[in-house]
Every structure is written in structure tokens, then in C-alpha cells.
Image (spheres, grey):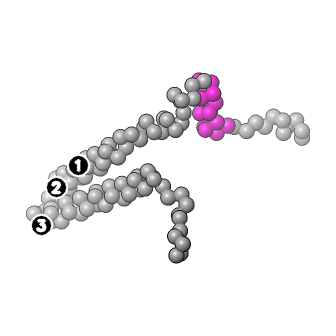
Amino acid sequence: MQERHDQIVSTPSPIHHLQLGIEIAGTLSLFSPIRIWHQSTDMGFPATTLIFAAIGIVASLCTVICFNRGSSSNLFHLTLVLTATICCWMMWAIVYLAQMKPLIVPILSEAE
């Protein structure tokens, strides 16, 4: 039974592999996970806003082409598509911007 226990080896997590790679590389400042994450999110807000705008334009064109049933119906469909696109973008923007300065611990005033 003891021999069986010695043969079992736990598999390291991906974070362990990343830390091991950092140690092997020897230059912590260049391969730091924080630096890699920061560089990948520098253009996050403007780029994703443009993606949402492109999706809204493509969805609007598809609505006009596929559901052409008259001017009032087209206006209603376009209103729905644009409202949905703007609401999805606003939800994403609120979540994204809330992560920039997170509220870790609320500070209560003396009156509360």
C-alpha cells in the first residue's frame, strides 16, 4: 500500500507552469503575469467599443435585408436591434469600468 502512495504524483496547475517558466527565464520583470495582463488590456475599452459598434451595424444591415416588411416595421426592428446593442455595450462598459477601481472594503461613515 505504501508503494502505491509513493507513485501517485499530483499534476501541477497552469499557474505553477507559468511560475516555473518565469523562474527558468530568470527575468521576472519581462515575463511577469501582471505585466502580460496589463499589456493585453491597454486598448480594451476602445477596441471592444468598436467591436460592439461593428456588431450593431452588421445586425442592423441584416435586419433591413432579411426582414424588409415596410417602413414602420423596419423602423421598429432597427430600434430593437440598436437598443439591444447599446444595452449590451452599456452592461459590458459598466462591468469593465467597475474593475478599474474596485471597492474592496466599504468605508462606513460615523453616522452609520
Q: Residues under labels 1 and 2: Cα distance? A: 10 Å
**Nearer to us in this view, 64 or 48:** 48
Q: Answer with the quarter of the image where residue 32 lies.
A: top right
Q: Earlier in the sequence, mark 3 or mark 2?
A: 2
**Nearer to us in this view, 40 or 81:** 40
Q: Residue at 39% of width from left, 53% of height from top?
A: 97
Q: Position of residue 2 (x, y in %)?
A: 89, 39
Q: Residue at 67% of width from left, 37% of height from top?
A: 12
Q: Residue at 25% of width from left, 47% of height from top?
A: 54
Q: Which residue is mark 2?
A: 64
Q: Position of residue 48 (x, y in %)?
A: 33, 46
> Is 62 positioned to the left or the right of 22 in the image?
left
> Is 98 positioned to the left or the right of 48 in the image?
right
Q: Is residue 73 above or below residue 32?
A: below
> Is 32 positioned to the left or the right of 9 in the image?
left
Q: Position of residue 80 (x, y in %)?
A: 24, 63
Q: Which residue is mark 1?
A: 58
Do the numbered discs 3 and 1 sit on residues whose CB atoms are within 8 Å? no
**Nearer to us in this view, 51 or 69:** 51
Total tally of numbered discs in the picture: 3
Extent of the magenta region: 12-25
Q: Earlier in the sequence, mark 3 or mark 1?
A: 1
Within 10 Å of disc 3 (Cα), the crowding (few <14, some 14-19, many 20+) is few
Within 10 Å of disc 1 (Cα), the crowding (few <14, some 14-19, many 20+) is few
Asked if residue 57 can be seen in this view, the reply is: yes
Q: Residues under labels 3 and 2: Cα distance? A: 12 Å
**Nearer to us in this view, 46 or 29:** 29
Q: Say which amino acid is labelled 1.
A: Val
Q: Which residue is mark 3?
A: 72
Within 10 Å of disc 2 (Cα), the crowding (few <14, some 14-19, many 20+) is some
Do the numbered discs 3 and 2 sit on residues whose CB atoms are within 8 Å? no
Q: Answer with the quarter of the image where residue 4 lies.
A: top right
